[in-house]
Image (spheres, helix red, strand yellow):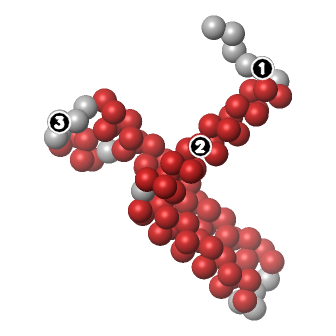
């Protein structure tokens, strides 16, 4: 199997990331809630009388919440794919 290099690797990586984001938003209610919360809170941060650096810090913290949720969804999908039986370690993932 030939690996993609250069620009095509970036294109495929962006496509896979977009597919993952769409899957998280369509399949996970928590991801949708956090995404809409992000949009709402981003609008709130633009209305606050804070410096640009403080606004960037608030937006970065909101983005980190979304990233962690998407990672959590990915881990849950992998655990569900590996085994459908109940196991205490699966609950901890």
Q: From this view, report whether residue 25 is shown above or below residue 53.
A: above
Marks 1 and 2 in Cβ contact (< 8 Å): no
Residue at x 55%, y 72% (from the top left corner): 36
Q: Who comes first in sequence, dot 3 or dot 2?
A: 2
Q: Mark 2 falls on what kind of element?
A: helix
Q: Position of residue 6 (x, y in %)?
A: 82, 24
> How many numbered marks, from 0 up?
3
The Cα atoms of the two marked residues, 3 and 2, are separated by 27 Å
Q: Mark 1 falls on what kind of element?
A: loop
Find residue 50 and report its image quarter. bottom right
Marks 1 and 3 in Cβ contact (< 8 Å): no
Residue at x 73%, y 77% (from the top left corner): 55
Q: From this view, report whether residue 73 is shown above or below residue 54.
A: above
Asked if residue 68 can be seen in this view, the reply is: no
Residue closest to the eye, 69 or 53: 69
Would residue 69 be found to the left or right of residue 82 on screen? right
Identify the residue under disc 3. 85
Q: From this view, report whether residue 16 is shown above or below residue 23.
A: above
Identify the residue under disc 1. 5
Q: Position of residue 64 (x, y in %)?
A: 58, 60
The Cα atoms of the two marked residues, 1 and 3, are separated by 39 Å
Asked if residue 49 can be seen in this view, the reply is: yes
Identify the residue under disc 2. 19
Marks 3 and 2 in Cβ contact (< 8 Å): no
Residue at x 39%, y 41% (from the top left corner): 77
Residue at x 22%, y 36% (from the top left corner): 84
């Amino acid at each position: 199997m030939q690996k993609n290099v250069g620009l095509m690797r970036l294109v495929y990586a962006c496509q896979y990331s977009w597919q993952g984001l769409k899957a998280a938003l369509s399949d996970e209610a928590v991801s949708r809630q956090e995404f809409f919360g992000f949009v709402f809170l981003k609008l709130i941060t633009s209305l606050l009388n804070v410096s640009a650096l403080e606004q960037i810090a608030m937006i970065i913290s909101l983005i980190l919440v979304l990233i962690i949720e998407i990672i959590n969804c990915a881990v849950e999908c992998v655990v569900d794919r590996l085994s459908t039986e109940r196991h205490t370690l699966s609950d901890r993932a």
